Amino acid sequence: MAAEELKTGPLEYRTQEGQMGIMGFWIFLGAEVVLFATLFATYAVLFGRTADAPLPSELFEPGIVLIMTFLLLTSSFTCGLAIHEMRRGSVKGLIFWMAITLALGLGFLGFEIYEFVHYAHEGATLQSSAFWSAFFVLAGTHGLHVTLGIGWAILLLIQIKQRGLTNVTSRKFFIISLYWHFLDVIWIFIFTSVYLIGMVI
Amino acid sequence: MHITDILVTGEPIIYGAMVSMALGGLAILFVLTYFKKWGWLWREWLTSVDHKKIGVMYILSALLMLFRGGVDAMMMRVQLAFPDLGFLNSQHYNEIFTTHGTIMIIFMAMPFLIGLMNIIVPLQIGARDFAFPYLNALSFWSFFFGMALFNISFVIGGSPDAGWTSYTPLSGAAMSPGPGQNFYLMGLQLSGIGTLATGINLMVTILKMRAPGMKLFHMPIFTWSTLVTCFIIVFAFPILTVALALLTIDRIFGSQFFTLTGEGLPMMWANLFWMWGHPEVYIVILPAFGIFSEVISTFAKKRLFGYNVMVWSMIVIALLSFLVWVHHFFTMGAGAFVNSVFSVSTMLIAVPTGVKIFNWLATLYKSKIEFTVPMLWSLAFIPSFILGGVTGVMLGMAAADYQFHNSYFLIAHFHYVLIAGTVFACFAGLVFWYPKMFGHKMNERLGRWAFWLFFFGFHVCFFPQYFLGLDGMPRRLFITNVAEWLPLNVISTVGAAGMALGFVVFVYNVYYSFRYSERETTGDSWNGNGRTLEWATTTPVPYYNFATVPYVDEIDPYVRMKEEGKTTFEEDKVKPIHMPSYTGQPFIFMALLGLASFGLIFEWMYLAVFGLIGGVVMMIRRSFDYDDGYYVSVEEIKETEKKARGL
Ligand code: HEM
Ligand SMILES: [Cu+2]
């Protein structure tokens, strides 16, 4: 297995282990798509079931959500730059752009937490109605994913400091970049089908 | 909280179970200590990442669960045959049919099949282990601790009692307070993580680690069935994960998904549950089809008839399995149009299934059948399964289903498919591959006894239940002293006793064969009838599986290898083999998550948080773990192979 190593191509694809890890992660992302699809479907079914709690159109406002969207989309771009630097063999560039990605991700999380607290103050919590349960669990699951991604990326940054670019470390970074872009895509769906639609209906 | 608040008290049967569990536990502790086996247990098994050993552990657990679920079943049958005896009260009966159903599906059928896949699939494709051996161990331990959690519920905290389908609002916090239902949710959640990981793991293994030259359409049919099953697992299990999580959040954190307050929608649970649940049914039947195909073609001594059609029919079944879930609740009132659509899609599944039946028959046609025990199970499967399938189509007719639903007709249907399909296949597969796992066959005479007892017992037990259903006997009912129902119920219980006896003989056979069976000398155990690569390895299989991996460019490659005198040991081609190192991490990791789940079940949040933090620490450790395994030297391989092959 580990014995054969290609001499050309991106580092992360040179060993069979690297290729298998990446393929496994793609399949895992397939499962994640189903997971989020189920949450979206639940949200759609429970839409409008607000009981005595405020309506989404009363609480959702474009301002902060737009900033969050901007932060996360930009972080996806910088994450792409990080992988670009990695492919060029530049550890420094990789660390630089990855750190920016994480800072943007943290900013996103901060706004999301602020947003949730704000809704809670207005009387919309996990417990207040079926609709708000669905909202908090859908957006919260995404937020939890972002949190895990940040923690994971920090571990990888420590490892790249220790070991430099190898087949293994580059595979790990490549995989977390897939994960990060995936979260971005999910957010676009949350932004449009939850916030934008929630604002107008 | 006082200890008596946690332990279940006041039930003589449960006291009995507690005492026997305590005694059994003590006996195991004593034996391990007395024979100084603790180190052996840890080094050889608990830390193992070898797919063959993990497979054996899966199968042992599954047999244990077949016993536990079987005891539940026998208790139900006794109650139903002697309703005036007062053997079980209604609460206890509810708990037992819930644990019986859940255990049989989640902790018996799936792990049994996954265990067989673990052992056989890498051998069939010429691989040396799984793509991710560490993850494979993690999967096993997540299943194991999920199973342990679910099983202790009846002595600690109380069993779930809302049916294996756990319908809301009954299973919600308002109507089922207490830890019982939480045991169901967390037990399934924990083991579900492992199942999903296994699905991904096997998929990558099959797609990436096949022998050189082996195309997808050269793969043995059991491997194909595994690949298709993994596809279903990857796309169905996340739905269960979400459903369980939402209900857990409802129960523990007060959200309103399935509640009657806050505009929740209890019916959404039924939808989510069966969107996973129906594909799940195919997760446990497709590998069974794969096993029967292997056994039938081996003992008919022919290539499987219509190999390509067999593969495509499995793929079609897998796709259709996602489009029929509403047939489990036609009576919920979705309306005539929706019911018609799902009625038609349900009946469509019968087409590819029928195609498979005819292919098996065509394989058997004009062949010289060898009536070994695995072949007996496979031959018995065909007509028995047809009975289950035909009644399934009857149930699929929405209008008629208003009559059949939740009656014993339904019970008979799914036992005909699950037992005659999945359970027969587990027995067939275990007996068939037994020599590969343990180096000796199971005794044929005892095997026949087990088979005939189980086979007749099965039909005597479940055939009458079709008529009980037509006579109006509902399921999940503990008082049945209606005069017209009694005779058939008694007959059914007699049949159940026959099955129980068959199981006992089967287990005794394990012991008997261990003592007395001849040890295998060749790898090709069934009179040289092996057709696929697993039979090309020596017995017992060396831990690296293949000294040299043969080039494969056809179906059933081992047939030609034998003709040409080729083996999996070409001395001049042996190279060092890379193998993963054993590790205790998966065990500890999942034990910690088990602890966290236990905390959540009782809503002891400190314990839950502690376990979760432990789990995160284990994940961090794993991230920094750069252990790259080790190499087996050429000398060692040559020596092992020469000894095993008597060269
Ligand atoms: C040892 C032989 C078995 C016997 C005698 C038996 C008996 C029964 C009985 C009497 C019930 C109905 C209880 C009621 O609703 O009142 C039942 C339900 C069920 N059985 Fe079995 N069973 C056996 C094996 C199996 C196996 C091997 C499986 C699965 C692979 C299985 C899966 C189920 C399921 C899913 C239910 C439904 C549970 C529920 O509705 O909550 N059974 N069984
Ligand atoms: Cu179904």
Image: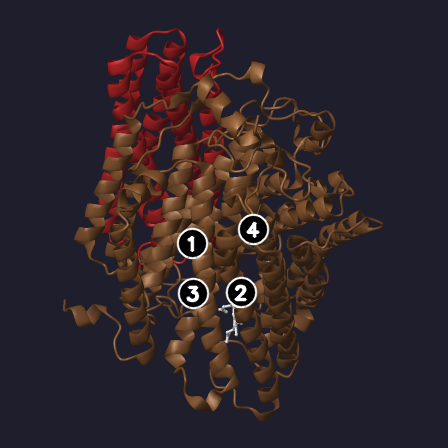
Callout in the foreground (1, 4): 4
Assign a secondary structure to mark 4.
helix
Q: Amino acid at mark 1?
A: Ser
Inter-mark Cα distance, 4 to 2 = 15 Å
Inter-mark Cα distance, 2 to 3 = 16 Å
Q: Indicate which disc, 3 or 1, sits on the residue closer to the N terminus.
A: 1
Q: Amino acid at mark 4?
A: Leu
Callout in the foreground (2, 3): 2
Q: Position of residue B445 (x, y in %)?
A: 62, 60
**Mark 2, chain letter?**
B
The residue beneath circle 1 is B61
The residue beneath circle 3 is B68
CB atoms at circles 3 and 1 under 8 Å apart? no
**Mark 4, chain letter?**
B
Q: Which chain can be seen in brown? A: B
Q: Position of residue B325 (x, y in %)?
A: 58, 57
Residue B276: tell me if it is visible.
no
Q: Are marks 4 and 2 on the same chain?
A: yes
**Mark 3, chain letter?**
B
